[in-house]
Amino acid sequence: MTLDLHTRTLPAGDAAALAAADVLRGGGLIGFPTETVYGLGADAAAPAAVARLYAAKGRPSFNPLIAHVANLDAARKIARFDSRASALAAAFWPGPLTLVLPKAEECTVCDLATAGLDSVAVRIPAHPVAQAILRAFGGAVVAPSANRSGHVSPTTAAHVRADLDGRIDLIVDGGAVDVGVESTIVSCLGAPALLRPGGVPREAIERLLGCALADPSPAAAGEHAPLAPGMLASHYAPRAQVRLDAGEVRPGEALLAFGPAALPGAETACATRNLSPAADLTEAAANLFGFLRELDAGGARVIAVMPIPPHGLGEAINDRLRRAAAPRD
Ligand code: TXA
Ligand code: MG
């Protein structure tokens, strides 16, 4: 495929939603905002479009994609819901939750997008721009995060352009996203299992279900599926080395801070960003990927990261930071 496309950018609005739907119908690729991160969208029913998506992203094609739909009627056309899945959908959709479900008989999501599994990951995004595009298009849109494979996820249209200019047809600019980390993924193939922590905290899901979420098992994730996204250890890697749970800043390091406390050596940091001076995990999630990009762009060799509490959205933040810190292949 050619990777020298002219990538248009349009401000969000009715004209952009129609243009995005046209691109999707023509087998093209769009970058668009969801409440979690920007997505790289293609027609879920078109294998050629999905193949272009994998190529544009440089993603290994064994990684199955999330199908995004506008509403529950559309979700029920592609997946089967048991009572627990229905309860989760009613409580958290539209929103930052993805459910892995058995494929419906008439599921139109192509095998390339589900990596040949007989399950499918489904999400109804809450973002008004994503909603407008899905309604204008009418079908399911598969969308991983709109970054090159191995880079951190994009939370602004400028991040999408930095990674995918010339590789996709259209970017719809809806401003900075709200949540800032990807959706929580729950498998409902057996006992509900947490495949990836994300924008809906584990505690909220467990309260709704009245039981603990299981750990992912091969049965829950589908026999040939990667157990959890980021089996690729350095999935969220910036160029800089990431040092977690820093108790001090060492010479030459950049600092990713959290909360009001000052670290010893902080004044020597070559650059500093504070995820949330008020120690608010929601604010920290929204800032995470953008601040990693900024510190990386500043040329730091090491980013020291202060400890982040493990509860609520902290589980997803710590998960992404551990991946960013993992040894590179
Ligand atoms: O917030 C999000 O979820 C963003 C926005 C754009 O919606 N999307 C996103 O997609 O993060 P992606 O491709 O980075 O993550 C999707 C993950 C895959 O890594 C895969 O492991 C899991 O979902 N997945 C998809 N289908 C699956 C299936 N049938 N069984 C198990 N896991 C599945
Ligand atoms: Mg991603």
Image (spheres, helix red, strand yellow):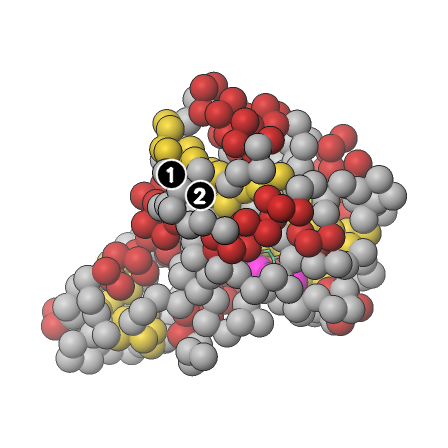
Between 204 and 200, the one nearer to me in the picture: 200
Question: Does residue 117 sit above or below 53 in this rendering?
Answer: below
**Magenta-highlighted residues:** 195-199
Q: Determine the residue positioned at 53% across, 38% down.
A: 28
State yes or no: discs 1 and 2 in contact (Cβ < 8 Å).
yes
Between 304 and 33, the one nearer to me in the picture: 33
Question: Does residue 240 sit above or below 288 in this rendering?
Answer: below
Where residue 30 sits: x, y (%)? 48, 38
Indicate which disc, 1 or 2, sits on the residue closer to the N terminus.
1
The kind of secondary structure element at disc 2 is loop
Where residue 126 sits: x, y (%)? 56, 35
Horizontal side of 32 relative to 242 (left or right) equals right
Horizontal side of 209 relative to 262 (left or right) equals right
Q: Which mark is residue 142?
A: none
Residue tagged by mark 2?
A: 168
Q: Determine the residue positioned at 35% across, 66% down.
A: 238
| Quarter holding residue 119 | bottom right
Where residue 138 sits: x, y (%)? 66, 27
Q: Point out the residue furthest to the right here.
A: 105
The kind of secondary structure element at disc 1 is loop
Q: Determine the residue positioned at 38% across, 46% down.
A: 4
Can residue 127 be seen in this snapshot? yes
Question: Does residue 233 sit above or below 184 in this rendering?
Answer: below
Residue tagged by mark 1?
A: 7
